[in-house]
Amino acid sequence: MSTVRTGTRFRKKKAADHYDVIVIGSGIGGLANAALLSKLGKKVCVLEQHYTAGGYTHAYEREGYEWDVGVHYIGEVHRPNSTLRRVFDVITDGQLEWAEMDTLYDQVYIGDKAYNFMAGPQNFKEEMKFNFPEESDAIDQYVDLLYETSSKVPKFFAGQALPKTPGTLYNKFRDKVLPDYMFKTTYEVLSGLTQNQELIAVLTGQWGDYGLPPKKAAFIMHAMVAKHYLNGGAYPVGGAARIAETIIPVIQQSGGEVFTYAGVDEVLVKNNKAYGVRLVKGDELYADEIVSCAGLVPTLNKLLPEESVKKNGYDKLVTKVETSSAHLCIYAGFKGSAESLQIPKKNFWLYPHYDHDKAVDDFYASKDMDFPLVYISFPSAKDPQWEERYPGKSTVEIVTVCKPEWFEKWQGTTWGKRGDEYETLKQELTGRLMAKLYQHMPQLEGALDYVELSTPLSTQWFQWNEGGEIYGIEHDVERFRQSWIHPKTEIKNFYLTGSDVVTAGVGGALMGGVMTSMAMMGLKANKVTELLKKGVSPQAQETEQTV
């Protein structure tokens, strides 16, 4: 069992009789929401069913190694003036530090050909033009479009910060005030810039960051991710667990707490008004407002009383969204430091050929086909404090997509006790994924010390989601047309937060926490804005003073 723990193990005697707010789930959206409300004087209780807080930002340790489960890399946070950095500075009281990755932060392989994603828009354009000299104009137009889309994203999500009625109304008509490319697929938009299929494949070489290939993914999702990483990536100093570690004290400052081993069985609702939660263990806790960071679909299918779901029409609305891709993840430990093993501070993205959509379809039709995507990350190399904590060791994570149906026969079984057939399947998939690593990092093969594979069942077990999905609800065009998805629900005093109210990824979920906080504050939403304006890091203040 992991020794990396954040949060306080739940005991009824440790909990207050009543809170201002209860947040279900300690993903980054829930933690951000709780910390911002705490900064505004509210007593917030965060309830996490896992043994450690953080959701997809948590870390775990086994056999003397430590891995993150979802942080991998984050854009913009190494830039002191960026919005994400400001939010993190506020919710951690400036205690969370970031280490920038190499200038070559993502290396995309399509077949045997490598394409380098370099930090900085000019570097990125130059590298793309080196590979596609005849597409110079299209590459310039593409980067300009990323910036243009990014400038319109606040307008796209403005309704999420408004009270429910005007917010939903705004969402319903935003396609009238925003460009049509924000409601098209990535492939449709990029095909308007170039007919070069190889270039389109390379420009969408980070599609694993949101889980859909270009003919299915909404362009707005692609553009947000691509712009997010245009200036490179960063990693939390001290590892992913530092995220929750630095936020929890802020929540505690106003009398709140983050409890682990505190799975919620049901939200308590009376006369269409939420007033508390019942835990799996039977204890009941009460609050003026309840927030779910458990994901839109799990919240509607598992947490809310069936009567409340039907009364408010959510049973029909939930059928309009799909859950995102499931995934497999290798967690491997190696003897030797990053330096001795020559491990870089970059990621690999490996694709079999230039047609991402066909590769996915082929693999989903038969898992014996080549993986349509393999992402390889080196967390120990990205963390400058790693060698102090785990001297002479290194870690690698390898991620790919998969169908949850492949593991359906083991549904309902206990983690670690699923039988020989399950273990044999895992071993076969592990061998194939490790071969991808050794193809690009052959020096690691003799240094392997420990390896394990997580499946959608593992994700379901630890993350409490529907089918092991990694990115909440699917990021297709239809998802971004759903005007009803809003932080404030039709149930009085009940809210949603996290990635499903904005978009996928740590940054999206973080901003979900901000949007929910603003929606909860209603006419006093400007207090959240003021908080974020004041929370400029010392480096940002120095930068502003010298400009």
Image (cartoon, rainbow, N blue to C red):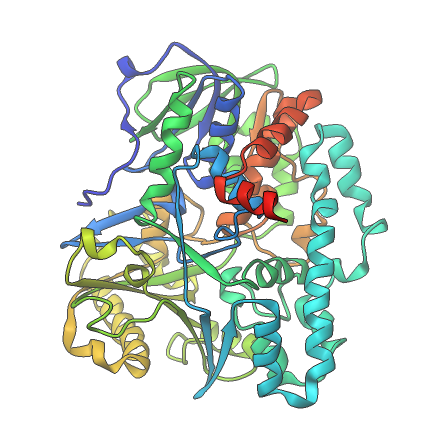
Where residue 107 appears, as percent x and y from the top left, is: 45, 75
* Label total for image: 0
In terms of depth relative to the viewer, which is nearer, 527 or 282? 527
Q: Is residue 287 left or right of residue 421?
A: right
Q: Is residue 533 left or right of residue 336?
A: right
User: Within the image, what quadrant is residue 191 found in?
Assistant: bottom right
Q: In this rendering, is residue 269 above or below 415?
A: above
Q: In this rendering, is residue 392 above or below 292?
A: below
Where residue 86 appears, as percent x and y from the top left, is: 54, 41
Q: Quadrant of the N terminus?
A: top left
In terms of depth relative to the viewer, which is nearer, 107 or 293? 107
Please name the residue shown 68% across and 23% down the image. Answer: 522
Please name the residue shown 25% across and 38% down the image. Answer: 5
Whether residue 416 is visible here, answered yes or no, is: no
Residue furthest to the front in view is 546
User: Within the image, what quadrant is residue 367 found in?
Assistant: bottom left
In terms of depth relative to the viewer, which is nearer, 188 or 296? 188
Residue furthest to the top in view is 17
Q: In this rendering, is residue 488 above or below 54?
A: above
Where residue 502 appears, as percent x and y from the top left, is: 61, 45
Residue furthest to the right in view is 176
Whether residue 400 is visible here, answered yes or no, is: yes
User: Within the image, what quadrant is residue 357 found in?
Assistant: bottom right
Please name the residue shown 57% across and 87% down the image. Answer: 131
Where residue 369 appears, as percent x and y from the top left, is: 41, 80
